[in-house]
Amino acid sequence: MTSHVHLIFRSIEKQNPELLLGDYKRFTSRSIIKAIQENPRESRKEFLLDYFKKEAQKTSNTSNFQFWRHDNKPIELWSNEVIQQKIEYIHNNPVEEGFVFRPEDYKYSSATDYAGSKGLLDGVCVFQYFKL
């Protein structure tokens, strides 16, 4: 989505989900900031970097750039039915927002994979990996 991300993930080695999410946010924010800084064709470079710097100044635990919000809205997925429900919600989000007519048409969605085609990433089908 343009303003947020939905993730379904599982720790397969009994790692703390909060720590995994923190690692994900650190890695992706650094990668995105670096991509913005190093891309000579990024027309919004100054605006974006200035915005992320100003956001970092509002918090005591961020020194350079603030990309992600500090809060999350985790939901424990405790059954196959709940997992399927959340996957369908995530896939239909771009349709509800009016970005696409069909979930599998949204470029950044795993709905493409669930519809039998190849999406941008490998290994995104939850039921495929966990035999749910």
Image (tube, rainbow, N blue to C red):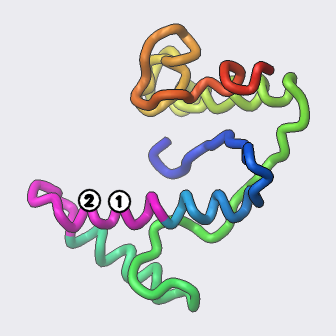
Residue count near mark 2 (Cα–Cα under 10 Å), binned few <14, some 14–19, many ≥20 = few
| Residue toward you, 112 or 23 | 23
**Residue that sits furthest to the front in the current view:** 13
**Residue that sits furthest to the left in the current view:** 40
The amino acid beneath tag 2 is: Ala
Q: What residue appears at the point 62 percent right and 70 percent down from the top-left corner?
A: 70
- The residue singled out by tag 1 in the image is 32
Q: What residue appears at the point 16 percent right and 58 percent down from the top-left corner?
A: 39
Q: Give the range drawn in magenta.
A: 27-45
The amino acid beneath tag 1 is: Ile
Q: In the visual, does 41 lie left or right of 88?
A: left
Residue 83 tag number = none
Most common secondary structure along the magenta stretch: helix
| Residue toward you, 13 or 30 | 13
Say what secondary structure mark 2 lies in.
helix
Q: In the visual, does 111 lie left or right of 9?
A: left
Where 13 falls versus 107 (above or below)? below
On whether residue 112 falls in the magenta region, the answer is: no
Residue count near mark 1 (Cα–Cα under 10 Å), binned few <14, some 14–19, many ≥20 = few
Q: In the visual, does 23 lie left or right of 63?
A: right
- Does residue 109 show up? yes
Q: What residue appears at the point 72 percent right and 62 percent down from the top-left corner?
A: 18
Q: Quadrant of residue 117?
A: top left
Q: What residue appears at the point 68 percent right and 39 percent down from the top-left corner?
A: 8
